[in-house]
Image (spheres, rainbow, N blue to C red):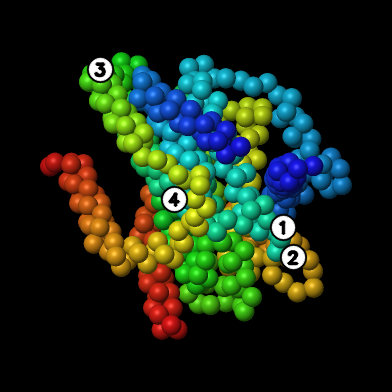
Amino acid sequence: MTEFVFYTIAVGLCAFALLSVTVGDVFHSAVWLTFTLLSVAGVYFLLGAPFIGVIQVLVYVGGIMTLFIFAIKLTANIGDARIRQFTRQLWPGAVLAAVLLAFLLAVIRANAWSARALPPVQGPDLKEIGTELLTRYLLPFEFISLLLLAALVGAIVIGKVKK
Amino acid sequence: MTPFLMEMAWLVLKGVMALTFIAVSAMFLIWLERKVSARIQNRVGPMITGFHGALQSVADTVKLLLKENIVPTGADFWVWWLAPFFVAVPAIMVFVCMPFGPSAIVCDLNVGILFMCSVTSVSVLGIFMAGWGSSNKYSLLGGMRSAAQIISYEVPLLLSILVVVMEAGTLSMQGIVHAQEAGWFFLKPNLLVAFIIYIISATAEVNRVPFDIPEAESELVAGYHTEYSGMKFAMFFVAEYTNFFIIAGIAATLFLGGWLGPLAPSPVWFLLKAYGIIFFLMWVRWTLPRLRMDQMMSFAWKGLTPVALLNVLVTGWLLVIKG
């Protein structure tokens, strides 16, 4: 049953991801990307990590996709038929993706995956995640917030109308 | 029957129960809104169909089911077609974690309240897709306004929920209810502030007066669902009233003790509290005028958000002092 659900989600995920980079209309691309991100959340739920799955939906679909859509809407003439999405580097991109796939397959093949034999692990406790973030991983955590702040300030500087 | 099939049958049964509740509740709320608004405006409201118009919503549903589905010329068909699902499905999914009683819950996830918030955030996309796909400028404007408003008010909304989570020490909906056995949360001053912020921002989240500028009839026809007819329109309508019930249900659970209460069975207490909040919000809707767009945005960012942040800080201090 789990395998069936996994393969359904996986096939959907690949199809949505492909569609999101190949369709011509930018808004359609955003909609397909939403489906892709929701499928990834589905994989997290299937792996028994509901917290990560929920955060995936909240951050990526609720936050980032909404921002994407605002960006699309606020760009002048974006709905115009003349402005189509196109891929200039289709073949280099495809080759790069193929190399990555081969590398990942090699890594996957090289390891003996004994997950089936192991007893199911209790998912990380929410309290543990919080404690770890504010003790052991405090520096990366703060660094990410600094990075976000820098991005925010940068966006404001770029977006400011020059007088 | 194998245990697997039993489990599946039980899940399907729970799902059917939740869906039935959603449909009946939406129909009841539409009738209630018409009656309440009528009484506030010194009218009587629907009276002909059934006792005091009780069957009016049923008649309306049948009418909507039989209506033609009109696709506007120039619509972006698939985006237009998908939009109602993006709005209605999250509204239904939230009921997975809605606690009607100690055991009357579909699934008590340990990330319950977070799950509810993340699922509802998906519906912004549906609203925007409806506005974009209709190829109608009123729809697009309504969709834009709605999306801007929802993401702005989500900040104080989540911050006020955070205060409850800090106080309860859990994200599970049942856990939050159990944490209130000593006293309902709205009795504490910092949580009362959170309750008020929650109610204001939740009203904005469901686009109700005084925050209904996305569907202001006098300037936008009906906002993002202008171009929808028949069942598609009904889906938006049901989703709207389901979301209305959801915000009231969450408020009742987080601040008013959920299903806790003496004598009467727990689902009765839960519904009583939720419908009490719904009645209050209807009263607000038919009493206040609507705000302007800029007033609404500056109220969210300059008024509610700082107060909510300060409230989180104070709650943190109080928790540290208490140990």
Residue B134 image offset from top left, x and y in percent: 50, 25
Name the residue: 32% across, 32% down. A106
How far apart are the alpha carbons under marks 2 and 1?
9 Å
List the residue tagged with mark 4: A52
Q: Are marks 2 and 4 in contact (CB under 8 Å)?
A: no
Q: Chain of mark 4?
A: A
Q: Amino acid at mark 2?
A: Ser
List the residue tagged with mark 2: B266
Q: Amino acid at mark 3?
A: Trp
Name the residue: 47% across, 36% down. A39
List the residue tagged with mark 3: A91
List the residue tagged with mark 1: B104
Choose mark 2 or mark 4, whichever is in front.
Answer: 4
Name the residue: 41% across, 56% down. B155
Q: Residues within 10 Å of mark 1 (few under 14, many from 20)?
A: some
Q: Residues within 10 Å of mark 2 (few under 14, many from 20)?
A: many
Q: Residues within 10 Å of mark 3 (few under 14, many from 20)?
A: few
Q: Of B59 and B113, which appears nearest the observer?
A: B113
Residue A118 image offset from top left, x and y in percent: 49, 50
In this rendering, position of residue A121 left or right of residue A103: right
Residue A160 image offset from top left, x and y in percent: 19, 43
Q: Are marks 2 and 1 in contact (CB under 8 Å)?
A: yes
Q: Are marks 4 and 3 on the same chain?
A: yes
